[in-house]
Image (cartoon, rainbow, N blue to C red):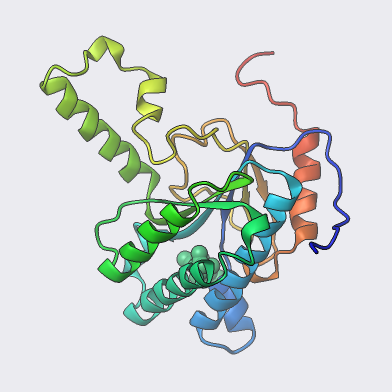
């Protein structure tokens, strides 16, 4: 039987939360470990926080796993991250039955060019395998860049305009949103960045225009459910005006 969890209650919950999983390298360095060990610990935190978000009843979460700029890292580090990603997808497949009640629908956002065919297969397979799950949508941003996403959308729209399928007058914010990877999803209400940096680093650039931001010094591998609760308590108190008064 599923264990009954004691969960905190919140007056308002964000519908969509974005996580910038930063600080893995420093976490490893502080322990004299290779950077790949930091990513391994970060992948564990990712699992824990994704499941906790589902338990809390959050509709959608997005984790920034690999940016379009992260290819600049040493090959061994890139490979280590891709391997962890593949391990997670294989685990989702192996445990699909025992994890039935978690209700996690997986989606991948980002440019599929550059991702290995083996990983692409796993991505397609797990997206299909979980497409009927409805508790939470968990987006993993892989080879993702916000500006790249907007440029790709503009290219698609321009092609259709040239073919006469879209009139320039029809191009508005809703139409552009429909050409992004997150089509149909709510915009992130809250973006969380641990590890002491105060920037959003090309993450959900269009979608995050009105996101509340929450920063913390904690390194991602050390991020706990309690830190998440703290961010959610802060969000509860924010006065979101969306440009109004
Ligand atoms: C940023 O920390 C982190 C990344 C670029 C990789 C994040 C990837 C994972 C947590 C694993 C992905 C796996 C799954 C299952 C989604 P950093 O290395 O820039 O840290 P630093 O600033 O301390 O060096």
Task: Give the mark count.
Answer: 0
**Residue farthest toward the left in the current orientation of the protein:** 163
What residue is shown at x 56% (from left), y 48% (from top)?
133
In percent of width and height, residue 192 lies at 63, 50
Left or right: residue 194 versus residue 74 is: right
Residue in the foreground of this view, choosing between 28 and 98: 98
Asked if 78 appears above or below 189 in the picture, the reply is below
In percent of width and height, residue 47 lies at 62, 65
What residue is shown at x 18% (from left), y 19% (from top)?
165
Res 173 → quadrant: top left
**Residue farthest toward the top in the current orientation of the protein:** 169
In percent of width and height, residue 120 lies at 32, 62
**Which quadrant is the N terminus positioned in?**
bottom right
Asked if 16 appears above or below 97 in the picture, the reply is above
Left or right: residue 5 versus residue 219 is: right
Left or right: residue 222 versus residue 145 is: right
Asked if 149 appears above or below 39 in the picture, the reply is above
In percent of width and height, residue 116 lies at 28, 68
What residue is shown at x 68% (from left), y 43% (from top)?
58
Asked if 165 appears above or below 51 in the picture, the reply is above
**Which quadrant is the C terminus positioned in?**
top right
Residue in the foreground of this view, choosing between 38 and 119: 119
What residue is shown at x 27% (from left), y 38% (from top)?
151
């Amino acid at each position: 039987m599923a264990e009954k969890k004691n969960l905190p209650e919140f007056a308002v919950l964000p519908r969509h939360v974005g996580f910038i999983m930063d600080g893995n390298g420093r976490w490893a360095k502080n322990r004299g470990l290779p950077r790949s060990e930091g990513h391994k610990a970060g992948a564990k935190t990712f699992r824990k926080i994704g499941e906790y978000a589902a338990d809390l009843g959050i509709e959608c979460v997005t984790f920034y796993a690999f940016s379009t700029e992260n290819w600049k890292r040493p090959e061994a580090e890139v490979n280590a991250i891709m391997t962890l990603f593949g391990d997670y997808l294989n685990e989702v497949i192996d445990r699909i039955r025992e994890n039935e009640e978690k209700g996690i629908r997986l989606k991948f956002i980002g440019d599929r060019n550059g991702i290995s065919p083996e990983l692409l297969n796993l991505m397609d397979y797990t997206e299909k395998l979980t497409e009927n799950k409805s508790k939470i949508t968990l987006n993993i941003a892989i080879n993702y860049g916000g500006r790249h996403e907007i440029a790709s959308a503009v290219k698609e729209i321009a092609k259709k305009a040239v073919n006469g399928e879209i009139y320039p007058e029809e191009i508005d914010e809703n139409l552009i949103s429909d050409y992004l990877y997150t089509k149909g999803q709510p915009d992130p209400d809250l973006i969380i960045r641990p590890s002491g940096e105060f920037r959003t680093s090309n993450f959900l650039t269009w979608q995050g225009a009105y996101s509340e931001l929450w920063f913390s010094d904690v390194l991602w591998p050390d991020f706990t459910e309690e830190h998440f609760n703290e961010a959610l308590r802060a969000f509860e108190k924010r006065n979101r005006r969306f440009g109004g008064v």
